[in-house]
Amino acid sequence: MNYSDTDEQIKGFKSAINRCKRIVGFTGAGISTESDIPDYRSKGGIWDKFKPVYFEEFLSDEKKRFLYWQRKQELWESIRNAIPNKGHMFFKGLYDERKLIGLVTQNIDGLHEKSGLPKDIMVNLHGTNLEVICLTCGFILPSEEVLDDLDLEQGVPLCQKCGGLLKPNTISFGQSLREEDLDKARTLSLSCDLMIVVGSTLVVQPAASFPLIAKKNGALLVIISLSETPLDNDADYVFHQKMGDFLNRI
Ligand SMILES: [Zn+2]
């Protein structure tokens, strides 16, 4: 890439940030790999090693349910201890300047919440590992309360209120995204004057449709991602860099 072009682009990006007042962030796994959260779907990722447990199997198969909780338990310490990085703090900074009106993420690590973004401006398209939900009554509790002292020899955890099955509040394989989340993401995409995509390959649908909705509605579109995306040609500014390196430059 021609460096003077990049400098020109960075100037344009900075001026867009200064000018725009209704910014929406859209983030994927790439923003969190710099916090040592593995990219689950990439090569060498968790799903390369383990066959995923599908939602149907979780409901109907006791052994699969046990296996699912066993894996969550193994990952829990790294989920619990992960801390937001510069990329997450960048969006928190925009929020503090009252410019960020929403953040849509494909990640389930809860790092945007940990950075201090309020829950009501967040859309966790794939749910969050920081919560556990009862599949019968919908009761939600913090994951610490279930996972910190989980003893699977006593069986998988059950809801204290109704005895129903508990499950981390993430969207499993074979489970559809929540209609209310998709609606909220769509509304944000139609309300923003700038959408900043970080660390998403923009290939998983319908999630990846939101940046295009924003662009078609007249918003500026910025993509910061190590790899190319199908929307690179639609974007106003594209930076093929890690978010940390990009932020060091600006
Ligand atoms: Zn319940």
Image: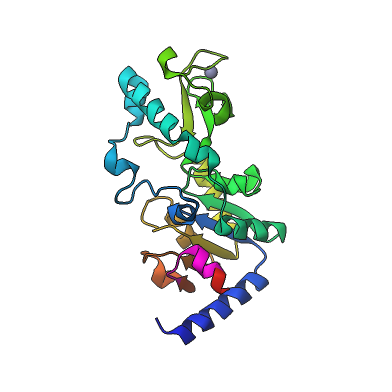
Horizontal side, residue 231 vs residue 131: left or right: left
* Residue 198 location (% of width, % of height): 49, 60
Viewer-nearest residue: 137 or 129: 129
- The single residue placed furthest to the bottom in the displayed view is 4
Residue 243 lies in the magenta stretch: yes
Viewer-nearest residue: 73 or 1: 73
* Residue 61 location (% of width, % of height): 31, 20
Viewer-nearest residue: 141 or 216: 141
Question: Is residue 220 at least partly visible in the picture?
Answer: no
Q: Quadrant of residue 50?
A: top left
Query: Which residue is located at x 45 percent, y 62 percent?
Result: 212
Query: Which residue is located at x 47 percent, y 47 percent?
Result: 107
Query: Which residue is located at x 42 percent, y 55 percent?
Result: 208
* Residue 60 location (% of width, % of height): 33, 20
Q: Quadrant of residue 86?
A: bottom right
* Residue 85 location (% of width, % of height): 56, 55
Q: Which residues are magenta?
A: 239-247
Image quadrant where one finds the C terminus = bottom right
Query: Which residue is located at x 32 percent, y 25 percent?
Result: 57
Image quadrant where one finds the N terminus = bottom left
Question: Is residue 79 at least partly visible in the picture?
Answer: yes
